[in-house]
Image: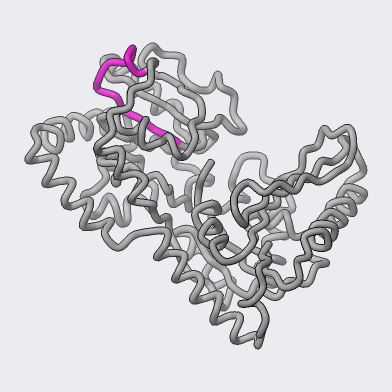
């Protein structure tokens, strides 16, 4: 998945090295670490560890791998940029010049979250010099925990998704799917309301629902087995505008539970930039601002969804003039939104933190972790 971390740190890589340390692979025959440059200035690091080893031994091995990475790649001055608090136990012995915690979600509410996550996150917040948060609802819930906290909700690579407005890519599988086509892409997990999807699909058998993305933490059998629900597996980020181009609507049937309480879906502005009207359940960071601005229809039941979709077909998609008028409103809203702008604002905050700590050499170094 090409999401917030990739958008931000790919911009970081224009001037500095970036090392993405992935979750370990646990079924290795031999302990090792993979260090692979995937694009200019970006390395992906994967530890390979033996299965069923003692937890303290595994922790020690992961610490050793961090040390090896720093030594092997000659990393002298660096920033630790955390997305998972669970990386703290095996990295807290290192001496980064600065620590950034980019808190995307309330991970402790996700399915199969480690029991120690909350406690470990508290330690990370205490250690961090800067704390970013991936949405306003999350920011309002956690801003009191850190003296240097900032909200940076989901942004967008408009140029990438604008291509969906002009492309007419059709995969062979699409040719067998009639219109109207209502699509979703993203991680498919416990945050999806499968019962709502089934209810809508049964209520409107002539509408066809397309799901694109990896299935995580749930079984593929969780996807309703109906003739008008089509699962296309995951697609590369570069391909997404091609697949979205041939939808009529986009939808986000998120469940309303603890796992979705603070999410700020990046796909909301992406769907809009692609020129697709959107229907979403009442996720807080979607309702405000997108729902309140009249850019996204909000529906929590099959009946509400049906009414919203039929209204879109009769108004926004009724003719070229109505669609152009709606699209103009979308473009006005998205005008000042970009990952470049988000990154520059984040960088300014980081630069200020560097100055306050009196760090003189960090701007010259090429190594960030």
345 versus 357 height, above or below: above
Q: How is the image coloured?
A: one colour
314 versus 69 height, above or below: above
Where residue 261 appears, x then y in whole percent? 47, 50
Q: Residue at x 11, y 46 (%)?
A: 325
Where residue 340 appears, x then y in whole percent? 42, 62
Q: Is residue 164 magenta?
A: no
Q: Residue at x 15, y 46 (%)?
A: 326
> Magenta residues, as a range?
174-185
Quadrant showing the N terminus: top right
Q: How many marks?
A: 0
Residue sitting nearer the eye, 172 or 247: 172
Residue 170 occupies which quadrant of the picture? top left
Where residue 68 appears, x then y in whole percent? 85, 57
Q: Residue at x 92, y 49 (%)?
A: 57
Where residue 260 appears, x then y in whole percent? 48, 46
Quadrant showing the C terminus: bottom right
353 versus 188 height, above or below: below
Q: Residue 12 vs residue 126: left or right?
A: left
Q: Residue at x 81, y 41 (%)?
A: 48
166 versus 296 height, above or below: above
Residue 322 occupies which quadrant of the picture? top left
Q: Residue 311 vs residue 358: left or right?
A: left
Residue sitting nearer the eye, 331 or 126: 331
């Amino acid at each position: 998945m090409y999401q917030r971390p990739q958008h931000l740190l790919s911009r970081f890589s224009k001037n500095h090295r970036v090392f993405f340390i992935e979750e370990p692979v646990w079924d290795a025959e031999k302990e090792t670490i993979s260090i692979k440059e995937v694009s200019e200035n970006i390395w992906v690091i994967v530890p390979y560890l033996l299965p069923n080893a003692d937890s303290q031994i595994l922790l020690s091995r992961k610490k050793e791998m961090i040390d090896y990475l720093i030594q092997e790649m000659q990393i002298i001055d660096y920033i630790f940029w955390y997305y998972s608090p669970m990386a703290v136990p095996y990295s807290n012995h290192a001496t980064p010049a600065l620590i950034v915690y980019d808190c995307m979600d309330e991970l402790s509410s996700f399915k199969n979250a480690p029991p120690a996550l909350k406690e470990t996150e508290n330690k990370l917040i205490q250690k961090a010099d800067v704390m970013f948060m991936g949405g306003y609802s999350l920011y309002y819930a956690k801003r009191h925990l850190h003296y240097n906290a900032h909200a940076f909700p989901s942004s967008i690579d408009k140029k990438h998704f604008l291509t969906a407005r002009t492309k007419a890519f059709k995969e062979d599988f699409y040719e067998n799917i009639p219109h109207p086509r209502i699509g979703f892409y993203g991680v498919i997990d416990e945050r999806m309301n499968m019962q709502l999807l089934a209810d809508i699909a049964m209520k409107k058998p002539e509408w066809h629902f397309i799901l694109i993305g990896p299935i995580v933490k749930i079984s593929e059998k969780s996807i309703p087995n109906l003739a008008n629900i089509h699962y296309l597996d995951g697609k590369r980020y570069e391909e997404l505008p091609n697949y979205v181009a041939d939808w009529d609507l986009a939808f986000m049937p998120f469940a309303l539970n603890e796992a979705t309480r603070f999410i700020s879906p990046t796909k909301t502005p992406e769907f809009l930039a692609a020129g697709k009207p959107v229907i979403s359940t009442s996720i807080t960071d979607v309702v405000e601002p997108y729902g309140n601005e009249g850019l996204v229809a909000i529906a929590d039941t099959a009946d509400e969804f049906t009414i919203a979709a039929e209204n879109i077909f009769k108004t926004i998609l009724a003719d070229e003039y109505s669609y152009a008028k709606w699209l103009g409103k979308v473009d006005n809203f998205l005008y000042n939104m970009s990952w470049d702008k988000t990154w520059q604002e984040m960088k300014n905050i980081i630069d200020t933190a560097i100055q306050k700590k009196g760090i003189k050499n960090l701007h010259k170094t090429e190594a960030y972790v």
